[in-house]
Image (cartoon, rainbow, N blue to C red):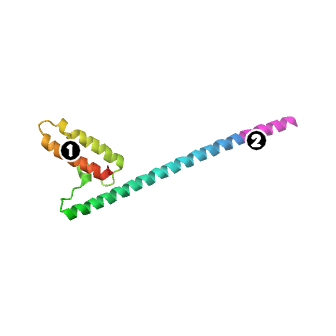
Amino acid sequence: MRKGTEEQKRKLDETTKNFDRTMEEIKKQREKEEKEKQEAEKIKREEENRRKREEEQRQNRQKTGQNNVDYYEVLGVSRDATRKEIDVAYKRMALVTHPDLNSGHENEATERFKKIREAYEILTGK
C-alpha cells in the first residue's frame, strides 16, 4: 500500500511541475505578445504623427509658395518606409554627400547634405 502511495505522490509532483512550467511558458508568451502589441502601437503612433507633420508641412509650403519636395525621394526610401529604414538611408546618404568627404564639390555637397538633413528631420520629427 505504501509503495502505491509513493508512486501516486511522485506522479502528482511531476504533474504539478509540468503544470507550473506550462503556466510559466504561457505567462512569458503573454508578456511577449503584450510587448509586441505595445511596440506595434508605438510604431503606429509614430507613423500617424509623421503623416500629420508631413501634411502640415505640405500645407505650409502651399501657403508660402515653396516647391513641393518629396522627402522620401530625397532619402531614396519608399513612402511606407519604417523609421529604421529612414535612419539607415539618412546615414548612408549623409556619408556619401557630406561636404567634408567631397573635396572639390563642397558647394554642391553642402546643398545636397542640407536637403538630406531636412528630409530626415521632417520624416522623423527630430
Query: In this image, 103 relative to 60: left or right?
Result: left
Check if residue 106 falls in the magenta segment.
Answer: no
Q: In what element is the residue under mark 2? A: helix
Write down the quadrant of residue 97 in the picture: top left
- Whether 71 is drawn above or below 92: the answer is below
Residue placed under numbered mark 2 in the picture: 12
Which residue occupies the foreground of this view, 77 or 62? 62
Check if residue 7 falls in the magenta segment.
Answer: yes
For the N terminus, the quadrant is top right
Which residue is located at x 28 percent, y 48 percent? 120
Write down the quadrant of residue 3 in the picture: top right
Residue 116, given in percent of the width and then of the height, sits at: 23, 47
Residue type for callout 1: Phe
Whichever of callouts 2 and 1 sits on the residue coming sooner in the sequence is 2
Which residue is located at x 25 percent, y 53 percent? 71
Q: From which residue to which does the magenta span run?
A: 1-15
Q: In what element is the residue under mark 1? A: helix
